[in-house]
Image (spheres, helix red, strand yellow):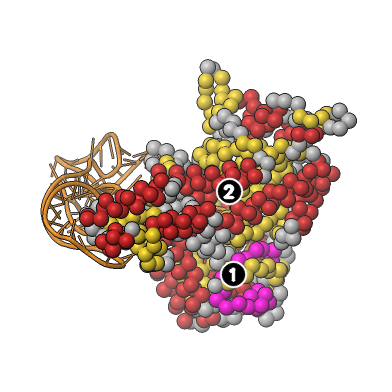
Amino acid sequence: MDRIPCRCDQFGWNRENLVPCGLRFFIFPRKERMTVEQNMAAINQEEILRHTTAHIMAQAVLRLWPGTKIAIGPVIKNGFYYDFDLEHRFTPEDLEKIEEEMRKIIAEDLPIVREEISNAAAVALFKAENQDYKLELLEELDETVSIYRQGEFVDLCRGPHLERTSQVKHFKLQSIAGAYWRGDAQRQMLQRIYGTAFLKKEDLKEHLRLLEEAAKRDHRVLGRQLDLFSIQDEGPGFPFFHPKGMVLRNELEAYWREEHRKRGYVEIKTPIMLHEELWHRSGHWDNYKENMYFSTIDEQTFAIKPMNCPGAMLMYKRKLHSYRDLPIRMAEMGLVHRHELSGTLHGLMRIRAFTQDDAHIFMLPSQIQEEIIGVIDFVADVYKVFGFKYHVELSTKPENAIGDDAVWEQATEALRQALEAKGLDYVVNEGDGAFYGPKIDFHLEDSLGRTWQCATIQLDFAMPERFDLVYIDENNERKRPIMLHRVIYGALERFIAILTEHTAGAFPTWLAPVQVQVIPVSDDYVAYAQEVADRLFAAGIRVEVDRRDEKMGKKIREAQLQQIPYMLIVGQREQESGRVAVRHRRRGDLGALEVEEFLQQIQAEIAEKRNS
RNA sequence: GCUGGCGUAGCUCAGCCGGUAGAGCAAUUGAUUCGUAAUCAAUAGGUCGGGGGUUCGAGUCCCCCCGCCAGCUCCA
């Protein structure tokens, strides 16, 4: 399956209308390769289809529950939704009823008619319809608005739409959720129904299959099945890492450490808890207090760190630095705690205590570009090892920025030039930077085509200022260094979650919690199995012997389900020849090898961090 | 935090109109000694998320709390 990223500047049209829409980024699965134009046209058609399907859904809901107030029903990535306000609470069974009613509306083959009317006329119309939300929307709209009618249903809508309801064929309603009117927690909570629709039946099936596949790979499910981690009621958002999960962490950290060592980083560890005063100085008290945990020690207030930077600032300030010392690259696997809203917690993806693979680089203004390129290359190297594709986004100065324009200009330009120098394509998010500086985000794409923002490089003008960081330049004058924050994995816990879903639990051998399972054919060969295991263990391989009194087939099945890369079957033949019968979790029976031969092969695979 | 749904054995789930809990897998024990994805049998296992209430009687009904799941910018 190909995924073609493409941008859409036009919403598409039905007959007479050509309506612009905002710039958006799509990654869309297609079975066959198409030209960008064909792909764009297909996406536009799909969007129109989904928008029309949303209307049909609203119509169905109004038929089933007359008096329902309808809010908005836009197209979203891979589908659509519509928000409703009614007394009745939707249940999953209702979705089937609504789908059934939708099929009736489709069978009625109603023509979909666009009308342009004055805002005032629309107000009169929707007042008569008792559609308060539409009235509120109208307050912000132009003098002339468009409405769409199909049968008895009428909706305020800029369109475009299909011409007849019968053109909608392949759709599915997916879920019900609460959503605030206009996303504002202070306002009315509405009931939202999500659904999707496709032009082709196969595309709908493929989409639903992908969702099922994603559910099977859910790291929360695999995390339990593979015994990697757990989250218990006693610590919501505070994960327990089990022995097997710790292997992943430790391997990822060891690799990370080695790569940092090669690139001239030093490693530090700053305290989890620091005095309240520090957080006033850093600005976190003003901007981040709601998300922080506090504790009192000897009548003084201490905060548990939500970020590592203030600690790194103190570390830098411990001595006076010469321009000759820069750049200083200070890395820290920093455990941070953040009080995330209870409703947003999600497995290891969103937790309240996690480990950032942080680094702070202190440098001269002249070193900005080189350092940024260094990090960009670093990210590329690391993601390549895991087989992740990725794309890059550049975020520029926001409204509430601090620092003067010239510095912003210089910093943004440095980021831009670094990206150009590397020949990287990137998307620009105007005004999406942090208040203290512009940033580059890396969004990696997993095996199901989902994207995750992980690595980020952020230039920061605020911290060096607030902490009065200095270095002595060649004229013996005090100067302000430039600082950048960066992470590569992002958060170790989240990266493990992404990796689990990406690999469906089949971690590459260098990461696999158990690399080799030795399976004696029967009790008689347990001693030989142990001998083989001891040899591998001595060579540093993570190996276990399945000495249970079970049939071989069962042991193989369970080792397969645990996604153990290699199973070594040993029975009489192997014992007599000093060999092992090698079975790989994906490639199956690979035949017999001398123990030393197998050891060499697996060691090479581990050393090269091969993805297999 | 908010809305809705959910919480029964380690896991997945059943349990009607209220009448003091059940299956499969896992576990334990025994039999079996087996050649590339599940051997057979027996046994054990639960303050039904926690607390309060209604009732002769609550897993089941009501209230409060905790936790989990889906979602809460994607602007007619």
> Along the polypeptide, which appears first: circle 1 or circle 2?
1
CA gap, disc 1 and disc 2: 24 Å
Between residue A578 and residue A532, name the one nearer to us: A578
Residue type at tag 1? Arg
| Residue designated by label 2 | A489
**Residue lying farthest to the top in this orientation:** A298
Q: Is residue A89 visible?
A: no
Q: Report the span colored magenta.
A: A20-40
Say if the magenta span includes residue A482.
Answer: no
At 58% across and 59% down in the image, what residue appears?
A: A388
Which amino acid type is shown beneath numbered disc 2?
Tyr
Q: Residue furthest front?
A: A577
- In the rendered image, the vertical position of residue A557 relative to residue B7, given as above or below: below
Looking at the figure, which quarter contains the N terminus of chain A? Answer: bottom right
Residue appearing at x 47%, y 48% in the figure: A248
Q: Which mark is residue A274?
A: none
Name the secondary structure under disc 2.
strand
Image position of A218 (left or right of A141): left
The residue nearer to you, when weighing A140 against A351, is A351
- Give the residue pinned by disc 1: A3
Left or right: residue B44 compared with residue A574: left
Relative to A331, B28 lies left or right: left
Task: Output the chain of dot 2.
Answer: A
Q: Output the chain of dot 1.
A: A
